[in-house]
Image: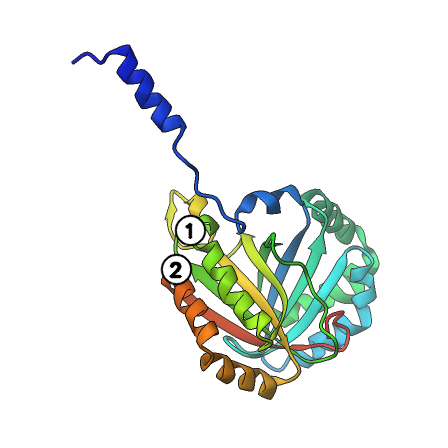
C-alpha cells in the first residue's frame, strides 16, 4: 500500500509538533547544577552504637577535612535499630572521586577511625540525591529533631507527579505545621523496583525524600494531627497520593558533632 508524500509529510510534522510534558520539578534544572548529596546509612552491631559514635566524634575532623558534612543523626524510630544516617555534600562526581582517593591515602583517618571501626558496622547503604529545583537546603533556627520521609512515586517521573507533590509539601510549609530542611530526588540508590536485565528504567527514578525539622517529637506529633484536620492540607495531600506507591519515615536525633542540630 503506497502513501503519498504529502500524507507522510503531514504525519511527520504532527509527530514533531507533539507537545512535551513539562514540570517545574523536572530533572533538567537539577542536572545543570552538579552539586549533589550522598545519603549514607550504617547499621551497627547491637551494643556498638555508642562506641561507634564516640569514635567518630573524636575523629570527625579527619573526615570533614576532605568534604562537607551536612548532618549526622542516630535513628530513634523507623526501621531497623542501631542505625546512623548522615549526609555529605559534593560539588560533582569528580569531586567525590577525588575525596574517596584522598581518604584512601589518609593514613591518620584509616588508622585512627576506619580500620578499628569497620568491625562495628553490620551494613552500609549509599544513595546519591539532588535537591529539587524549587527547594534549597535550609538550616533550622535551633536544636531539634528531624524526620526523613521517603516517598516511592509511581513510574512516570516528576513530569507526572511533581507539581502535585510540590503542592502537598508546600501546604505543610506555608501553614507552619513543620519546617522543611530540604527535598531530595534520588539519582542512584533506592529506585523504583522495575528492572530489565539489571538496567533501571529512566522513568523509574521516582524516590523522593523530604527532610523536616521540629522542635521536639511532641511538637511534630501535634503539628501532624493539626495538619490532618486542615482542609487545605488534606486537599493537597489527597491529590498527591494518587501518584504514591509507598511511604516510610525515620525520626532522627542529631549527634553532638552534627552541623545540623
| Residue 98 lies in quadrant | top right
* Residue closest to the eye, 140 or 174: 174
Q: Residue at x 73, y 46 (%)?
A: 95
Q: In this view, does 170 lie to the left or right of 67?
A: left
Q: Residue at x 58, y 58 (%)?
A: 184
Q: Position of residue 124 (x, y in %)?
A: 58, 63
Whether residue 60 appears in this view of the structure is yes
Looking at the rendering, in which quadrant would you find the N terminus?
Answer: top left
Label for residue 41? Answer: none
Q: Position of residue 59 (x, y in %)?
A: 80, 68
Q: Position of residue 171 (x, y in %)?
A: 53, 69
Above or below residue 254? Residue 68 is: above
Most distant residue in the left direction: 1
Above or below residue 23? Residue 3 is: above
- Figure coloring: rainbow
* Residue closest to the eye, 183 or 25: 25
Looking at the rendering, in which quadrant would you find the C terminus?
Answer: bottom right
Q: Residue at x 76, y 53 (%)?
A: 103
| Label 1: which secondary element | helix
| Residue 181 lies in quadrant | bottom right
Above or below residue 109? Residue 197 is: above
Q: Where is residue 80 in the image (x, y as percent from the top left)?
A: 51, 75
Whether residue 200 appears in this view of the structure is no
Mark 2 highlights which residue? Answer: 243
| Label 2: which secondary element | helix
Mark 1 highlights which residue? Answer: 160
Q: In this view, does 138 lie to the left or right of 187?
A: right
Contact between marks 1 and 2 (CB within 8 A): the answer is yes
Amino acid at each position: 500500500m503506497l502513501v503519498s508524500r504529502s500524507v507522510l509529510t503531514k504525519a511527520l510534522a504532527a509527530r514533531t509538533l507533539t507537545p512535551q510534558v513539562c514540570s517545574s520539578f523536572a530533572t533538567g534544572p537539577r542536572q545543570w547544577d552538579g552539586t549533589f548529596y550522598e545519603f549514607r546509612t550504617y547499621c551497627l552491631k547491637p551494643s556498638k552504637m555508642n562506641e561507634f559514635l564516640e569514635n567518630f566524634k573524636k575523629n570527625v575532623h579527619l573526615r570533614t577535612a576532605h568534604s562537607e558534612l551536612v548532618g549526622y543523626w542516630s535513628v530513634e524510630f523507623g526501621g531497623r535499630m542501631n542505625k546512623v544516617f548522615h549526609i555529605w555534600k559534593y560539588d560533582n562526581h569528580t569531586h567525590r572521586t577525588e575525596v574517596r582517593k584522598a581518604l584512601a591515602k589518609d593514613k591518620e583517618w584509616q588508622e585512627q577511625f576506619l580500620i578499628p571501626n569497620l568491625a562495628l558496622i553490620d551494613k552500609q547503604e549509599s544513595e546519591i540525591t539532588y535537591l529539587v529545583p524549587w527547594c534549597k537546603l535550609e538550616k533550622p533556627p535551633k536544636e531539634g529533631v528531624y524526620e526523613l520521609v521517603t516517598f516511592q512515586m509511581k513510574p512516570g517521573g516528576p513530569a507526572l507527579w511533581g507539581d502535585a507533590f510540590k503542592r502537598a509539601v508546600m501546604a505543610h510549609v506555608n501553614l507552619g505545621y513543620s519546617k522543611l530542611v530540604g527535598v531530595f530526588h534520588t539519582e542512584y540508590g533506592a529506585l523504583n523496583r522495575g528492572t530489565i536485565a539489571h538496567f533501571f528504567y529512566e522513568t523509574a527514578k521516582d524516590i523522593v525524600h523530604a527532610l523536616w525539622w521540629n522542635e521536639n517529637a511532641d511538637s511534630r506529633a501535634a503539628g501532624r494531627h493539626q495538619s490532618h484536620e486542615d482542609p487545605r492540607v488534606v486537599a493537597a495531600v489527597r491529590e498527591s497520593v494518587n501518584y504514591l506507591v509507598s511511604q516510610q519515615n525515620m525520626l532522627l536525633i542529631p549527634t553532638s558533632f552534627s552541623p545540623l542540630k
